């Protein structure tokens, strides 16, 4: 049996996910999968706009984004503001065994293309890093 990242039902169990992806099709896929897993999602196309987003529990970001702020710099800025932020880096050119330079501690890596189960596994790994209250 596979464990999936799905919080218990109920409004208080819903986690917030910030998805940052410049390809609208991939962004929609990630948003759909996370919404089905009981996340409230917000989708941004650039790191610049995502940097001012409301607090989130999970950041799912492409490494390469248009604008001044890429995925690594975005994750560093948001983690500085919210130390418990879980992070997933996505990329079509990612070695999933080696974190990219500057990656925040505990970040999960997800190569593109991916299947639903791979994304949910990355979510589980990223959330497992978060400090327990």
Image: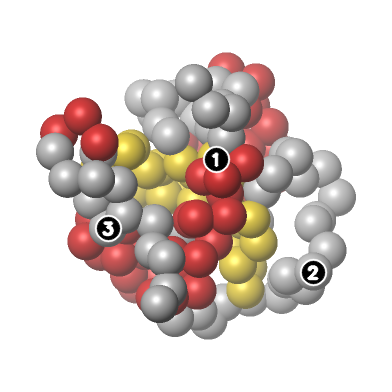
**Is residue 39 among what the camera can see?**
no
Give coordinates of residue 64: x percent, y percent.
64, 58
**Quadrant assignment, res 49:** top left
Q: Secondary structure at mark 2?
A: loop
- The spot of residue 37 in percent (x, y) is 27, 58
C-alpha distance separating marks 1 and 2: 18 Å
Q: Earlier in the sequence, mark 1 or mark 2?
A: 1
| Residue indicated by mark 1 | 86
Q: Which quarter of the rendered picture does the N terminus lie within?
A: bottom left
Answer with mark 1 or mark 3, whichever residue precedes in sequence.
3
Q: Return the residue nearer the eye: 23 or 15.
A: 15
The residue closer to the viewer here, 101 or 36, is 36
Tell me the residue at 62%/73% (across/down). 111
How many residues crowd around disc 1 within 10 Å: few (fewer than 14), some, or many (20 or more)?
Answer: many
Q: Are marks 1 and 3 in contact (CB under 8 Å)?
A: no
**Element type at mark 3:** loop
Write down the residue under mark 2: 97
Q: Residue at x 21, y 29 (%)?
A: 12
Q: Position of residue 3 (x, y in %)?
A: 42, 66
Identify the residue shown where x is 30% and y is 65%: 33
Above or below residue 117? Residue 125 is above
Q: Secondary structure at mark 1?
A: strand
The local crowd at label 3, few if under 14, some if 14 to 19, many if 20 or more residues have their Cα within 10 Å, is some
**Spatial CA span between label 1 and label 3:** 16 Å
Which residue: 76% across, 45% down?
103
Q: Which numbered disc covers residue 77?
A: none
Write down the residue under mark 3: 37
Which quarter of the figure has residue 53?
top left
Q: CA distance from mark 3 to mark 2?
A: 25 Å
Can you say whether 68 is above or below 97 in the image? above
């Amino acid at each position: 049996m596979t464990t999936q990242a799905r919080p218990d039902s109920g409004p208080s169990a819903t986690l917030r996910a910030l998805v940052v992806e410049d390809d609208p099709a991939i962004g929609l896929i990630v948003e759909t999968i996370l919404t089905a897993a009981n996340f409230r999602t917000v989708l941004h196309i650039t790191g610049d706009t995502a940097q001012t987003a409301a607090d989130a529990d999970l950041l799912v970001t492409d490494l390469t984004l248009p604008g001044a702020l890429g995925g690594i710099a975005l994750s560093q800025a948001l983690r500085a503001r919210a130390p418990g932020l879980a992070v997933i880096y996505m990329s079509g050119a990612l070695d999933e065994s080696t974190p990219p330079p500057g990656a925040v501690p505990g970040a999960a890596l997800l190569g593109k293309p991916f299947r639903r189960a791979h994304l949910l596994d990355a979510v589980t790994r990223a959330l497992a890093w978060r400090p327990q209250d």
